[in-house]
Amino acid sequence: MEEHNSLIRLHPHQSEGPYYHHEELFPIASHRRGDRPPRGAKRLYFHAKPYILIPRMTLTIGLTKPKVDSGEIGRVIGSDVTKLQEREIGNAQAWYYPEDKALVLWECYLSEPYRKDDPLQDPLLTTV
């Protein structure tokens, strides 16, 4: 795939809610394992959809008599970018526990064809 520079944009979503010890992936420091979290303990949920803008182009073609040597049937006589279209390139989700200052990155990935085979060598994934 040919590489191009594009500005990465993000559709973010944040919500807040309580959490319970049996739902967590690791022991939360602000309460002992098996105890309920402190009253009012909140978990912040983040969901983000990274995207780039792709121009929607319209080409005006002037048809000509087909050329035997090239198969050409016309030529571009005009072009116009009518609008920019959003194209999602991945997904990311995380939980943040403010009392513990702990962040759990639940998922963060890029869709094909935007990702590289080795995620450790993928600068776009690092950016997202």
Image: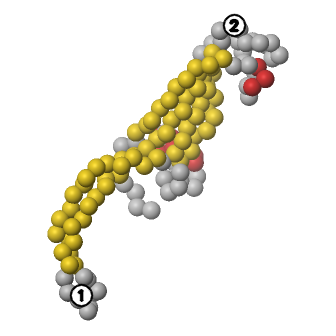
Q: Secondary structure at mark 1?
A: loop
Residue closer to the observer: 61 or 27:
61
In the rendered image of this protein, does residue 48 appear above or below residue 54?
A: above
Work out which residue is located at the far bottom of the displayed protein and give it: 68
- The residue that label 2 is drawn on is 39
In the rendered image of this protein, does residue 57 appear above or below residue 122?
A: below
Q: Secondary structure at mark 2?
A: loop
The disc at residue 95 is none
Residue 117 appears in the picture as rendered: yes
Identify the amino acid type marked 2: Arg
Query: What's the distance in space between the residues labelled 2 and 1, CA to CA?
Result: 78 Å
Q: Position of residue 109 (x, y in %)?
A: 56, 44
Q: Residue at x 16, y 69 (%)?
A: 77
The disc at residue 66 is 1
Instruction: Say which quarter of the image contains residue 103.
Output: top right
Q: Residue at x 66, y 12 (%)?
A: 41
